[in-house]
Amino acid sequence: MKKVMLVFGTRPEAIKMCPLVNELRARANEFDTVVTVTGQHREMLDQVLRVFDVTPDHDLAIMRPGQTLFDVTCDVLLRLKAVLEDERPDVVLVHGDTTTSFAAALTCFYLQIPVGHVEAGLRTHDIHSPWPEEFNRQAVDIVSEYYFAPTGASKQNLLGEGKPESRIWVTGNTGIDALRTTVREGYTHPELEWAEGSRLILITAHRRENLGEPMHRMFRAIRRVMEEHPDTKAIYPIHMNPLVRRAAHEELDGFDRLHIIDPLEVLDFHNFMAASHLILTDSGGIQEEAPSLGKPVLVMRDTTERPEGVAAGTLKLVGTEEDVVYREFSRLLSDQAEYEAMSRASNPYGDGYASGRIADVLGGN
Ligand code: UD1
Ligand code: UDP
């Protein structure tokens, strides 16, 4: 029996790893599945674990308020080492590009335990953007032995770096597995009832490189546009980072058509996406989910590692300059043809069965 350990620590990793945890656990005759969470996020991680009914076997509980990259990296390295020495799994699966994933992959490398990278091969090729995620994902791919690439384009990125084709599997993104089970007809929520009759704008923002002035500029642009469009209402489930919260409250408080609310559980958030008119975000995962739902997204970043969504027409990169965000957001509200062109549903990130494919590979099927 193969012992597989999954290591993750933040909300987006959990959303994309829990479907895989449940798939592996359902194949109990093939896999001894061990779940280790680093607790890089606390509340936002626990929300996801609850929704997917996943109870971790180990919790490194590393989160501290205002943690630095040094805190996260050092704590994961040292605490995970002890767990891995005790468990000695045959393979460790990490996800994407967080510092949890990077530090966990490095710990495995030092202990000579094989690493499988779920969501391998995403690239902007700009090591500073997104920061530090582009470094993290490249570093994880240096030490990995299994590459689970979500798309053909991510496979090409890996081949371009000389990774062996025999170790790369195109599986789709496990985030779409989650989406397949969450969006429901007839879903209601008091915040959606509040927004009924208006065009609903859904907002999220958290990227480290956007903290400070870029985030203030984004928020000012959003407020200016919404003030000019009285038929819009916005819901902003805000990240728990205190720096994000301070900037948002400074720029957006006192505007009663925009509600800042606590982070939503993933089931709720996916249904809010489905009910929205358009989305403004700097998130990675939302760029993958939106094309499946046919929801236009203005991506408030300078680069994206998700070119498939741009090619599909759902995503538009608008950066963080106030005037550009203002212009693009205004245009999408006023130009019906542009809006319709961006609203076509497509599935560049998979069919919702990625976890099964990954389990097949690990089981040698
Ligand atoms: C992290 C990841 C980023 C990912 C994002 C998803 C790194 C370096 N960054 O960034 O790639 O896109 O998660 O959201 O790995 N906090 C809480 N409770 C929580 C979560 C966060 O209070 O449940 C607060 C804490 O004060 C914490 C701060 O937010 O110190 C920042 O969290 P951290 O994980 O360091 O960075 P993120 O910006 O969330
Ligand atoms: N999400 C959520 N609740 C929220 C906001 C987002 O469950 O209030 C989900 C969203 O559907 C996506 C993931 O969280 O699956 C994105 O996480 P985040 O933006 O924190 O990180 P990123 O994807 O940028 O790494």
Image (cartoon, rainbow, N blue to C red):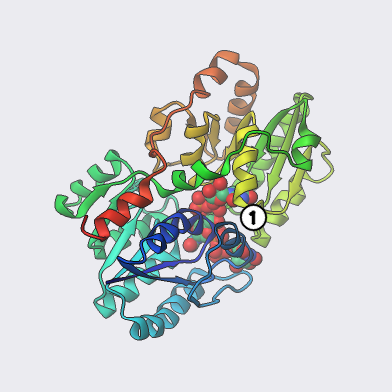
Q: Residue at x 48, y 27 (%)?
A: 345
Secondary structure type for disc 1? loop
In the displayed structure image, the side of residue 265 where residue 109 appears, left or right: left
Q: Position of residue 108 (x, y in %)?
A: 31, 74
Does 351 appear above or below 111?
A: above
Does 241 appear above or below 187?
A: below
Circle 1: residue type: His
Which of the two residues, 255 or 272, is positioned nearer the viewer here?
272
Q: Is residue 213 visible?
A: no
Does 241 appear above or below 325?
A: below
Q: Residue at x 40, y 65 (%)?
A: 101
Which of the two residues, 21 or 237, is positioned nearer the viewer here?
21
**Residue farthest to the top, as pictured:** 337
Q: Residue at x 49, y 46 (%)?
A: 285
Which of the two residues, 166 or 41, is positioned nearer the viewer here?
166
Q: Is residue 216 visible?
A: yes
Q: Which residue is mark 1?
A: 239
Q: Position of residue 186 (x, y in %)?
A: 68, 34
Q: Position of residue 226 (x, y in %)?
A: 73, 30
Quadrant for the N terminus, please: bottom left
- Give the tally of numbered discs: 1
Rendered image quadrant of residue 49: bottom right
Is ligand 1 within 8 Å of the beta carbon of the residue shown at mark 1? Answer: yes
Q: Position of residue 254 (x, y in %)?
A: 84, 43
In the displayed structure image, the side of residue 127 where residue 114 appears, left or right: left
Rendered image quadrant of residue 211: bottom right
Quadrant for the C terminus, please: bottom left
In the displayed structure image, the side of residue 322 where residue 308 appears, left or right: left
Rendered image quadrant of residue 280: top right
